[in-house]
Each structure stands twice: as C-alpha cells, then as structure tokens.
Amino acid sequence: MQQKILPYTSVFIKLLKGPVDYTERSTWEKLLQYKSDLSSFLQPLGLKLILSEEDGYSYVQHIGGEEDDASVSWIVRRALTYEESILLVLLRDMMAEFEISDSSSQELIKKRREIKEYAELFFKENASRVKFLKDIDRLIDKAEEYGFLALAESSDVADEQRFRIKKIIKARIGSEELEAFMNQLKQRKAVK
C-alpha cells in the first residue's frame, strides 16, 4: 500500500530551511493555496506559520517563543555577530525610509556601493581602508547568505551589483527595535 504524500510537503520542507518569499513563484502559490492546511499541520509540531501576503514572505516559528525547550528545534537558528546585526539594522532602516517615500516601485533595490556608503557612516573605520571595505563586503555577503538580500543584477564590477532588500527583514527587526537601535548607533557615533 502506497502512502499518500501531503500536497504541501515541499512547502513545509522549504519553510524548515528558511523563509519563503513571493519570488519563489510555484512554492509561494502552493503556500497560499494550502496555508490553512499547513497551519493546522504545523501546530501539533509546536510550530506556527507566519505569513505576510502584503509583503510577500512567510516563515515558521516555534510556538511559545524561542526559549521553550531550546534543546529541540525544527528551525535553523543563526547567532549574528554584532557587526552583522548592525548591517541588518541599517538595511531595515533603508527599508523604512523606502516605505515612507513616494516611490512607485514595490521593491527596494540598492547597489552594493550604496549599501557600503551607508554602512560606512556607522562602522568605525580601521587603519586599513581596503580591509575595512572588505569587511563591509563580507557583511553584505552574509546578509545575502542569511536571506535578507537577494542578488537582483550581477555585474563584473562588484560595487555595481544590485541587491533587493527583502521585506522579511521587517519580521526580524520591528519598527520599535529599529528606532531603539538607530538611536543607540547615533549616540555611539556622537561620542566618537
């Protein structure tokens, strides 16, 4: 007797690996089609489906918070370094500014150079400018690896690469957290 596989199994597996956004067309459509079935399936597993149709992203989180039974986890968690956290806050700040602008675009696209220029305002430059810029490049690459940036347009010149800042960053850093962190960064910068 052959076992019946649930029609949303592929979506469940993708969600366990990380956030899903609307650019993954077939997965996104299946997610929207089976969202209530998927939510019901996840609940007995101690998971909850978080879905923002407006912003076009979805992910799963543990029911009861991160600290409950931390020894068992379905979801991959990453500890961010302080520098990675700062870059994510800066990307989130760019997203906040974009959302209040009169832009007709639904996507926030920035060149690597633009992200670096903005980040330079908040990072302390070390003795070697070349090493400093390489460090920021590494942070941008990490943000892409973690799913907060997506390469929108490649270029032979690295600084001309264009990245889409994914709206999932809003789930990681809320507006209140953003405001508090930006105030801390500005105070730190003023002290230096």
Image (cartoon, rainbow, N blue to C red):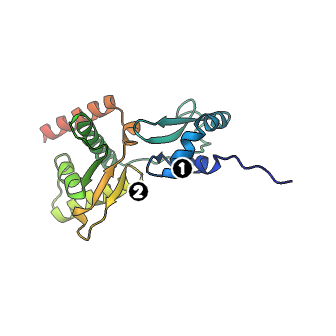
Residues under labels 1 and 2: Cα distance?
20 Å
Q: Amino acid at mark 2?
A: Glu
Q: Residue at x 41, y 51 (%)?
A: 147
In the depicted structure, whether residue 134 falls above or below residue 52: below
Q: In terms of secondary structure, where does tag 2 sit? A: helix
Q: Residues within 10 Å of mark 1 (few under 14, many from 20)?
A: some
- Identify the residue under disc 2: 145
Location of residue 135 in the rendering, given as x and y in whole percent from the top left corner: 26, 59
- Is residue 128 in sight in this rendering? no
Q: Nearer the viewer, residue 115 or 76?
A: 115
* Residue 162 as seen in the image, left or right of residue 51: left
Q: Nearer the viewer, mark 1 or mark 2?
A: 1
* Residue 153 as seen in the image, left or right of residue 18: left
Q: Quadrant of residue 159?
A: bottom left
Q: Nearer the viewer, residue 45 or 99?
A: 99
Residue closest to the far right: 1
In the depicted structure, whether residue 51 falls above or below residue 135: above
Q: In terms of secondary structure, where does tag 1 sit? A: helix
Location of residue 39 in the rendering, given as x and y in whole percent from the top left corner: 61, 35
Location of residue 70 in the rendering, given as x and y in whole percent from the top left corner: 57, 39
For the residues labelled 1 and 2, say whether their Cβ atoms are less than 8 Å apart: no
- Is residue 149 in sight in this rendering? yes
- Identify the residue under disc 1: 27
Q: Earlier in the sequence, mark 1 or mark 2?
A: 1
Quarter holding the C terminus is: top left
Q: Residue at x 19, y 45 (%)?
A: 122
Q: Residues within 10 Å of mark 2 (few under 14, many from 20)?
A: few
Q: Amino acid at mark 1?
A: Thr
